[in-house]
Image (tube, rainbow, N blue to C red):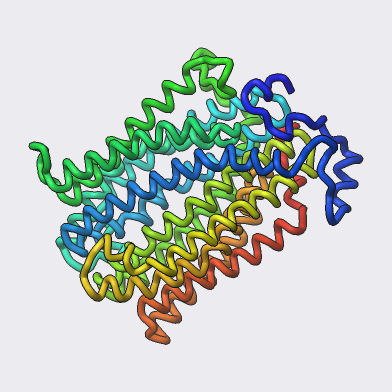
Amino acid sequence: MAENKKHMNLALDSVPFGTEEENREWMKMRKIPLPQGVTSKQMYKDTFRIAWPSLVELTLAQLASMVDMMMVGKLHYTAVTAVGLTTQPIFLLMTLIMALNVGVTALVAQNKGAGKKERAELALRQALMINFAVAALMTAIGVVFARPMCKFMGAQTEETLANAAEYLKIRMYGFLAFGLTSTITAALRGAGDSRTAMIYNVIANAANVLFNYLLIFGHWGFPRLEVAGAAWATIIGQYIAFIIAMVFVMTKSDRKYLHLDLKKGFKPDKDTIKNMVMIGIPSMIEQLIMRVGMVIFAKTVASIGELEFATHNICMNIQALSFMVGQAFAVSGTSLVGQSLGKSRKDMALAYGKRTVIFGVICACVLMILFFTFGGTIVSWYNSEEDVVRIGGIIMSFVAFIQPFQTMQFIQAGALRGAGDTRSTAIVTLITVVFVRAALGLLFVFVFHWGLIGAWVALALDQLVRTVLIFLRYRSRKWMNYARAAR
């Protein structure tokens, strides 16, 4: 317990390890009282302490992405289309890395709660070893198949296809750095250290925006690379983040929970890899299902027309900013629920989960009001063409409406992942992304002929159904039996 207090004082640190008998009793209770000496205020403080650096980091990262697309949009709306065509291929290539990162976050959180620092650091080394090989392979695939992937996504002109393929190929040169940095970030978040990731990602995003300005338009003597310049700016930022992240975890300090000791090597550890894979495989399936559904959905929208697809990508880019609230509080949920279960405190896991949802949904309601009020204006920052602004303003009403539901779903899904229950989220993703978003998108666009509005009706229904299903799983409490730290 002293080890944990040295790094962060949580309300969880003040309670003893739970017993099997206590956990059985807590599972039966509808309303579980807080442990003696623990206040609701302390738990909200713990939630905010982990969430705010993640919120700053993720929001600034998305703002950098928005600035990226705004600058590209100043070239022509077809440039936005070209960049948008690469989004799903990049996410598809990231699938396995993202899945393993879910595993490392859960294992680090649970092992920290259980007081097993060495096991937490071993999980980081094992994840870096595996993801290095995976990222190298994905880089090769992305470079070789850049043009076919962009063509498959629905590029309608040779100019758009050429720009998209060039952008994707350049982005792949930064894939190794991005993959390894994301693994370090996942481990730090599992340990409850979201501030460090905020620091190196903020620096990287600032560099990204600066080089966007220099390379897209050719300012200050730099070459004018247009769409390709946006890709180079992104990977420069990714390598900066990687270097800073590696320096941090390799520098030993009593103030840090995780230390990457290269002298301990990267010899495969059967138990750690097994637990990581057991958590990661359902997450990988979830990501693959999601990507398949998203590819179908993106191709459906791309078939409507280049202007509509550009408008869609602008609104998706804005919506991604709203994801940051849910994802930031999901980081809190994953870390605090994972640590609570590692300490065998199911009462604390539920208490943290409840307060994280309340905090996150309040923030989401603020965003909902902003998007309803200023949606069309925000779209005009990307591209001022009348049709883009008009259609985009309508789409932003959908983005506003789903805010509270989307955020609640992110946070509760994060709690499930912190417990290691990734199978449930995979099943929910299959149902909603494939059978709701993709299928209804095809129906509304090609049968009902609702155009881009129909696609966004399908997207909104996806978020609503997913929120209900995740809530039902969370309410069942069965996910609390998945923790693997003690195994």
Q: How many marks?
A: 0
Q: Is residue 173 left or right of residue 420?
A: left
Q: Is residue 40 above or below residue 306?
A: above
Q: List x then y, in percent, for residue 216.
A: 17, 47
Q: Is residue 236 above or below residue 152?
A: above
Q: Residue at horizontal 40%, vertical 48%?
A: 93
Q: In which quadrant of the rendered view does residue 334 lie?
A: top right
Instruction: Looking at the picture, tell me which residue is in the foreground, 400 or 429.
Output: 400
Q: List x then y, in percent, for residue 30.
A: 85, 56
Residue occupying the far bottom of the picture: 448
Residue occupying the far top of the picture: 263
Residue occupying the far left of the picture: 221
Instruction: Looking at the picture, tell me which residue is in the foreground, 359 or 313.
Output: 359
| Residue 103 visible | no
Q: Residue at horizontal 29%, vertical 44%?
A: 171
Q: Quadrant of the C terminus?
A: top right
Q: Is residue 382 left or right of residue 112?
A: left
Q: Residue at horizontal 51%, vertical 53%?
A: 287
Q: Is residue 137 left or right of residue 437?
A: left
Q: List x then y, in percent, for residue 239.
A: 32, 32
Q: Quadrant of the N terminus?
A: top right
Q: List x then y, in percent, for residue 284.
A: 53, 49
Q: Residue at horizontal 74%, vertical 58%?
A: 475
Q: In which quadrant of the rendered view does residue 118 lie?
A: top right
| Residue 255 visible | yes
Instruction: Looking at the picture, tell me which residue is in the foreground, 359 or 327.
Output: 359
Q: Is residue 79 above or below residue 230?
A: below
